[in-house]
Amino acid sequence: MRRLENAFWFAFAVPTLGIVLVLFFAPFLYSALGSFQSKSGQLTLDNYALVARLYTKDVLYTVGIATFSLAIVLFIGILLCGYLRVYGNKLVEFLFKIPLFVPFVVVGHAMRVFLAPHGILNSMVAQIGLINLDNPPSLAYSWLGISLALAWKNMAMAVLLILGAFRSVHETYLEAARNFGAGAIRQTLDVLLPMSASSLAVASVLMFTSMLASFSIPLMIGGGKGAQMTMIDVYYRITYQGDYGAANALGVVSYLLASGAAIYYLRTVTRK
Amino acid sequence: MKVNPGAMGRATVKIAFLALVLFVIFGPLSSLAIWSVAEKWYWPYALPQQVGLFYWGRVLGSDLMRSLQLGFFIATAVTMLTLLCTVPVGYALARFDVLFKSVIMMLFLLPQAFPQLPVFANAAVLLYKFDLGATIPGVVLIHMVGSLVYAVWIMTAVFKSIPVEMEEAAINLGASRIKTFLTIALPLAVPGIVASSLLVFLYSLDEFTGTLLIGAPFVVTLPVFMYNASMGYELQVASITALLLMIPGMVLLVLLERYLKAEYLSMFGRI
């Protein structure tokens, strides 16, 4: 009877684990191994030499975009959540949840038409005479466009995480600060922010890695020329050149960049 | 009647702030709505010269409907299979001293930390070896990697939140573990199961990276359809598709607004 029961649970665990092992961990290891192999299967470091030669700039570009985008998200997120925590505003809180459920591809396309040289944003700014549409500045197809799109999409997650952390700060601390005459900004920067620093660090790591790994947004609003984000390089390397060795080497670089998040995740498990 | 100038000022600031928020959130999305009805639009005009539903009519009679149906079919399959796998596994992880539990939990967590694209590209090679490339089962499988990883954690949390005492009572009265699971724990977990299956459904419907790598060129779901249209500068078609793609998410947001907790939504940092 006991054995039969164990078999029952096992029967469900096997396919569940199996799919994740075969379709995630096996390809993961395979890509790491493949990065050290030449096309004929010999062990080599050539792929990494190629990546260092061709893609160092792109890796820096990717890290730069993720950093800049994270800075925007944190700056707006912290001030906004401070305001929401101190005064409360159900409508604004709801509005900032919307980007969470707008898929990345839709964000990519929407930002493409919104930020294009003759897109809605430029038309509106031109109406009040700030720019000249004969020679319009273009945010789309540039690092700034990618950063803004990533920031827009990640803002929802940031608000959820930061506001959650701010809400867990007890009201008495804020009251004490108010008694000393602190306004909303002082309460945010001097009380809420230091008291939720660790949750904020975690949120930042998660958002940073998801931005580094972003694919569909740079695919849609990145420029065709110049530096690309690493995931685009990986994709082009495979689809246009069929060069899995270099693509995998670049993939391994991206795993290393993401290992901050991996370490954080590992600690969550070991803590439980 | 005297109007307090301070209150007036505050109200003005509040309205200006709300206007700014509305612009930030709906500005980019509004361009979709405008493009979807733009029949004739070239600069320097700030708005379309000719507005109409011409492209809506054209799009709704096109391949888009097939992509829509296909996406719903795949999402339904992914959701059902994911539930079938993760509900018992979540229960077992929540209640039993499973061997190597922390290793198993870790296996279901690490995929969320690493970039998907290089992994899925290699998974595609594997799926092609088994003749599953560019097929519906292949796409279902690749969607399941993402959804299983997410749903195992949620299901474990759902079962952990159910008090264990009722199940202990059933076991003391001689019920087997399986019977206890089916008659006590499962009914109590229904709200959590419903919420997470809605999220899994949405995840599958919106998934892009895996579908592009494994499904192309034969399995075209709505996100891939939209990507192709946008890249081909069919801006009206792409915008209409984008609007349709947003509907399920918005419905879910309104339905689940109160239950949205950050830890349940980690998956949505990725689609």
Image (cartoon, coloured by chain):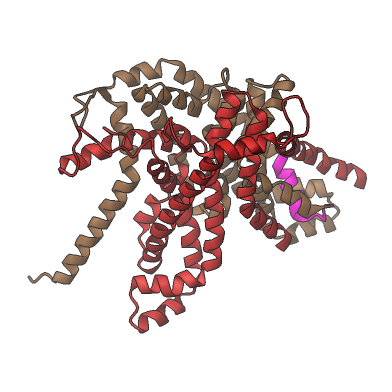
Chain colours: A red, B brown
Residue A175 rendering spot, x and y as whole percentages: 40, 79
Which residue lies at the image location 15% right of the left edge and 43% below the top edge? A129
In this orientation, which residue lies closer to the viewer: B134 or B148? B134
- Please identify the quarter of the rendering in which residue B239 is found: top left
Residue B69 rendering spot, x and y as whole percentages: 52, 22
The C terminus of chain A appears in which quarter of the rendering? bottom right
- Dominant SS in magenta: helix
Question: With A71 as the anchor, is A270 left or right in this view?
Answer: right
Which residue lies at the image location 60% right of the left edge and 27% below the top edge? A238
Range of magenta residues:
B85-99
Is residue A214 something one can see in this rendering? no
Asked if A183 appears above or below B109 in the picture, the reply is: below
Question: With B224 as the anchor, is A31 left or right in this view?
Answer: right
Q: Residue furthest left?
A: B1
Asked if B211 appears above or below A213 in the picture, the reply is: above
Which residue lies at the image location 38% right of the left edge and 19% below the top edge? B59
Residue A57 rendering spot, x and y as whole percentages: 51, 42
Is residue B66 something one can see in this rendering? yes
Question: With A209 as the anchor, is A117 left or right in this view?
Answer: left
In this orientation, which residue lies closer to the viewer: A217 or B259? A217
Question: Can residue B122 be found in the magenta stretch?
Answer: no
Asked if A236 appears above or below B185 in the picture, the reply is: above
